[in-house]
Every structure is written in structure tokens, then in C-alpha cells.
Image (cartoon, rainbow, N blue to C red):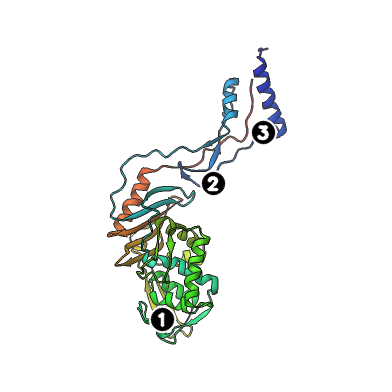
Amino acid sequence: MPKFHLSQLITIGIIVFILLFQGSAIHIFGQKAPHPLKSSQVELVAVPKVPIPIAQWQNLLAKTDVAYAQPSKREDLPPQITATSAVIEDGATKTVLFQRNADEQLPAASTQKMMTALVALEAFTPNTVLTVQAQDLEWSNVVGLEVGEQLTVEDILKCLLIASSNESAELLAREYPWGYDGFIDRMNQKATEFGLIHTHFINPVGFDATGQGVSANDLNTIADHFMSVPLLAAIVREPLLIVSDVTGVHQHSLATTNHLLVSSKDAVGIKTGTTPLAGEVLVSQFVVNDKTIRIIVMGSTDRYGDTEKLYNWALQTYTWVEPPHLLEKIELTF
């Protein structure tokens, strides 16, 4: 029979006590979804079911929680893009894979219609019917709405988010129970509730306005909330739709402004924006091999080219791994 030093006997006693307390087995379960190695989540150490020295048991007991390491990169140089600001985020773990000037407040153009949609769904049900008035069409009429036409809020949101209809944003804000200005106030209140510190809204459309802007990080947070609403997430996946007023007389063909929905099989939305001050803005989301990747580009002169470069760079640079299939139980053999 082997002899043990006092410290070894104490360690053995601790291990035996743990096993007895937990029913002689420690069950270790891994996560379900793949995620990049750069993660704030912690995983347990897998322990082999073979005899190992006491010293190694001591090391294992001291390292029961081990964070995933920084992802190993196959290329160190960032992608060459035209965008002033950009963010790449892994959707499952919310790990930021790339950022450039991500906290700089910039004009967001029509991408801020994501917040417009969120505020609208607080005040109205999708089946609420609203009536178009002349003032809604004062600045633009992208989808050809007519004064007096009545549409459901769901169809108005489709106009807003697929065709980027400015008149739909104006209609939703004007019909808001607390008035047009109240709608803008609520957009800013929600920004505060979301913890956004580089965001301020002045109109519901995204028209250029002094003092109005959103940072790429804040826009990404808005997108998180937006895509968590099933109705909105479903709308922005549609490349082409036809909506009609409640009578069925007036029909409107909606073609997406997001070309990625046509050119990329992995794209699942979400919103474009363009103004003279903002340049080209794009919030996009991709799903590939159970991975969700969101990309924000702001102040771009080639938003689709920039997004494609960032997407390919993320896939080439980062490795997603399943958590190891850990043993069902630890067995001690001496």
C-alpha cells in the first residue's frame, strides 16, 4: 500500500468529501451554441478518467474555472474599409470582434428608423389602423401613399423598414398618442433606457439635423433590441413585399433597400441609411453555420463593399469552437 504525506492525505480527504457531498459524481455540462474563443463566459476544466498524480489533482482543483482564451488570428491587419466607424459583433456571446471609432456619434440616417419602429410598437398594436394625412407626405412619398388612405401599423412598419419610407415615419410620429414631439422624446428616453450615451434623436426619419447622431456601438445596441422583436426581425428579412390599405384598393410594392438580402445567402437584414451628412450607413446581420454576426458601418462611401470585407475578415480571422464535450463524471483512481 502506497504511503502518503500528510498534505497528500488532506488533499485526498477533500476530494473524497466533495465526491460524497455531490453523490460521488460531478456532472459537467457544456454550452449549446458555438461561440468565438474570445468570451467572457467561463467553462469548467475537463478531467480525464485515468489515474493521475496528487499534484495534478491539486492543480485541477485550483483551476475549476478557466476563461476561454483570446482568439488566435490568422491575419493581424484589419480590413481596409472606407467607413469612418465600424463594429463587428458575434451575436451569441456579444463579443466585439472588430471596432473602429465605435463610440463616435455620427449621423445615422434611416438606420435610426429601427428606434422609430420600437417606439411605434409601444404605442400601437400591429392591427391598429392609421390614416395618412397631407403633412405626412410633405417631405417625401417613397411608396406612393395617398391622403386618406388607411393602413395597419404592421403594414406601415413594412413600408418604413423595407422601402425605408420617410412618410411612414412621419405618420407614426404624428399619430402617436402624446404627439409628434412626444414621439421624439420617447425615442430619446428609450436610448437612455438602453444605456446609450452617444445617441440623440431630433426627428423620426433620420434626416440630417444638427445635434442628431448615434455611435456605431449604440446603433448595435438598438439593433439588439430591434431584432429581439419577432415581427420586426421578420419584416427586415423580406426583399420584396406588396402591402395594401384596409380596403384592398390601394396597393404598394415594397423593394428592400438592403442589397445584401439579394446578393448574400447569409444575410438576414437589417437596415440601410443614406444622407449627405451621414454618407452610407448599413446595419447588417448574417447567419452562417449557426453563427450570427452583426456588422455596422457608418460614414462609408462603399457600405456593401465594406461590409463584405468585414464579414469575410471575421470568418477568416476568428475561430468559433464548440465547448468541449466534457466527461459526465470524475472518477478518482489511486
Residue at position x 42%, y 40% in the image = 71
Residue underneath mark 2: 32
Marks 1 and 3 in Cβ contact (< 8 Å): no
Query: Which residue is pictured at 48% across the width and 68% down the height?
Result: 187
Q: Position of residue 205 (x, y in %)?
A: 40, 71
Local SS, label 2:
loop
Determine whether the residue tagged by mark 3 lies in a helix, strand or loop: loop
Query: Local crowd at mark 3 within 10 Å, few (<14), some, or many (≥20)?
Result: some
Q: Earlier in the sequence, mark 1 or mark 2?
A: 2
Residue 28, x across and y down, in percent: 60, 38
Dot 3 and dot 2 residues touching (CB under 8 Å): no
The residue sitting at 29% across, 52% down in the picture is: 81
Q: Relative to 156, does residue 308 appear above or below in the rendering?
A: above
| Residue nearest the viewer, comparing 190 with 65 | 190
Residue type marked 3: Ala
Q: Which residue is mark 3?
A: 25
Label 3 or label 2, whichever comes before in sequence order: 3
Query: Is 209 placed left or right of 233 in the picture?
Result: left
- The image shows residue 195 at horizontal and vertical percentages of 50, 57
Q: Residue at x 49, y 48 (%)?
A: 93
CA–CA distance in space, label 3 to label 2? 22 Å
In the rendered structure, the answer to whether residue 33 lies left or right of residue 25 reads left
* Three-letter code for the amino acid on which mark 2 is drawn: Lys
Cα–Cα span, label 1 and label 3: 67 Å
Q: According to the image, label 1 marks what residue?
A: 136
Find residue 169 and report its image quarter.
bottom left
Left/right placement of residue 211 relative to residue 195 reads left
In the rendered image, the residue lying farthest to the front is: 211
Splitting the image into 4 quarters, where does residue 204 fall? bottom left
**205 or 257, which is in the foreground?**
205
| For discs 1 and 2, the disc positioned in front in the rendered view | 1
Badge 2 crowding class, 10 Å Cα cut-off, few under 14, some 14 to 19, many 20 or more, is few
